[in-house]
Amino acid sequence: SSGRRYSDRAPGRPARWAGVLDLTCELPERCFEAADDYKLVPCWDGAPPRGKALDAAAAFCVSARRRGPVLVHCAHGRGRSTTAMVAALVKAGLFPDWRSAFTACQKTRPCVRLNGRMRAALDAWEREYCVLAPASSGAIGLG
């Protein structure tokens, strides 16, 4: 099932999302009524958000997670959404760098993958937007 369907049909989903981060431009969004806040960062399959857009996506997730569950999605839930999720986990202070966050995501969801462009975008984002510090427990989690 594609990532967009999770937002409105998956068993066990929350009644409301505190935030929905949409990383697609292929399909219409279907969960506006079930989301308190929504952010669109339009990307085509295989093309990650970069720089300022990636940082804004990560900040959105951290902020929304303080209020409740957050859905980060792309069409298939493996690449674009993973790029934004690992940035959000680092921005929240849960991991010291994107590689550590990605390893944790792979343990929880083994199908996630980052292509070379996604890895390069995360490397550039980390250099430009992150002050690396030891991980701490805090704002958002994996489960």
Image (tube, helix red, strand yellow):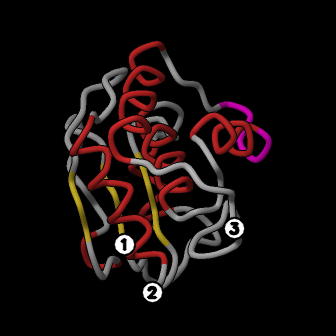
| x then y, percent, for residue 3 | 45, 45
Does 130 appear above or below 114? below
Say above or below: 49 vs 65.
above
Q: Which residue is mark 1?
A: 19
Depth order, front residue of 56/4: 56
Tell whether position 34 is magenta: no
Please, is residue 13 above or below residue 123 in the view?
A: below
Q: Amino acid at mark 1?
A: Gly
Q: Main secondary structure of the magenta part?
A: loop
Q: Residues within 10 Å of mark 1 (few under 14, many from 20)?
A: many
Measure the alpha-carbon separation of dots 2 and 3: 19 Å
1 and 2 marks in contact (CB < 8 Å): yes
Residue 9, compared with residue 124, is above or below; it is: below
- Left or right for 90, reference 53: right
Identify which residue is drawn at 64% across, 61% down. 94
- Look at discs 2 and 3 and give the one toward the viewer: 3
Q: Earlier in the sequence, mark 1 or mark 2?
A: 1
**Percent coordinates x, y for residue 65 in the rendering:** 48, 76
What is the secondary structure assignment of the residue under circle 3?
Answer: loop
The magenta span reads 107-111
Q: Amino acid at mark 3?
A: Ser
Q: Residue at x 31, y 44 (%)?
A: 54
Looking at marks 2 and 3 on the same chain, the residue that comes earlier in the sequence is marked by 2
Q: Is residue 5 left or right of residue 27?
A: right
Marks 1 and 2, Cα distance to the nearest angstrom? 8 Å
Q: Which residue is mark 3?
A: 136
Estimate how packed mark 3 is, as few (under 14), some (14 to 19) or many (20 or more) residues with alpha carbons within 10 Å.
Answer: few
- Please indicate whether residue 4 sits to the left or right of residue 50 in the image: right
Mark 2, residue position: 67
